[in-house]
Image (cartoon, rainbow, N blue to C red):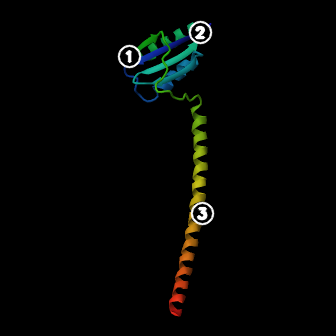
Amino acid sequence: MPKQCSIVIKNHVQFIGYRGFIETIAIKNDLAGFVYKDGSVRVVCEGEEKAIKNFLDDLKKISPEVSIGVEDKIAFPKPFGRVIVNLDREIFERLDEGVKILGEIKENVEILGEMRDTQYESVSILKDIKKLLERKA
């Protein structure tokens, strides 16, 4: 039967990629869950008891300098946040949305340029009309 577990990891866990490192070990041990940082690194996971034990053993072997504690209560991140399951997909979706927005901005800039040109023409016509009126006066 699956077990849920909340793990807090402290000491020297600030190097780049540590959460990705934990994710790799969790996947290797067939765990579900997520990892986040709140000053320490926290893992909320679910899996078979043996898989969780193996996960903890792997962490201790690979990072013996860290302090790993298992908490009774599931620790959810505060403030509430999103968990990104497929980072590559999310990045590409955001890039696609950014390209779309940039295209809309380009169209708006072109429209504004046309409006500016029309305004210049209108001002020029108004100046010509003013000159004609001044001559007749």
Of badges 2 and 1, the one in the foreground is: 2
Residue 55: percent from left, percent from top:
52, 13
Of badges 3 and 2, the one in the foreground is: 3
- Which circle's residue, 2 or 1, is located before the other in the chain? 2
**Spatial separation of the CA atoms under disc 3 and disc 2:** 61 Å
Instruction: Specify the amino acid type for callout 1.
Output: Glu
Q: How many labels does the image show?
A: 3
Q: Which of 13 and 74 is in front in this view?
A: 74
State the residue at coordinates (56%, 60%): 109
Instruction: Specify the amino acid type for callout 2.
Output: Glu
Is there a contact, CB below 8 Å, between mark 2 and mark 1? Answer: no
Residue 42: percent from left, percent from top:
46, 20
Of badges 1 and 3, the one in the foreground is: 3
Which residue in the protein does label 3 denote? Answer: 111
Q: Which of 113 and 1 is in front in this view?
A: 113
Q: Is residue 110 above or below residue 135?
A: above
Residue 125: percent from left, percent from top:
56, 80
Which residue in the protein does label 2 denote? Answer: 48
- Which circle's residue, 3 or 2, is located before the other in the chain? 2
Which residue in the protein does label 1 denote? Answer: 65
Pointer 2: residues within 10 angstroms few (<14), some, or many (20+)?
some
State the residue at coordinates (44%, 21%): 41
Pointer 1: residues within 10 angstroms few (<14), some, or many (20+)?
few
Badge 1 element: loop
Badge 3 element: helix
Residue 92: percent from left, percent from top:
60, 40
- Which circle's residue, 1 or 3, is located before the other in the chain? 1
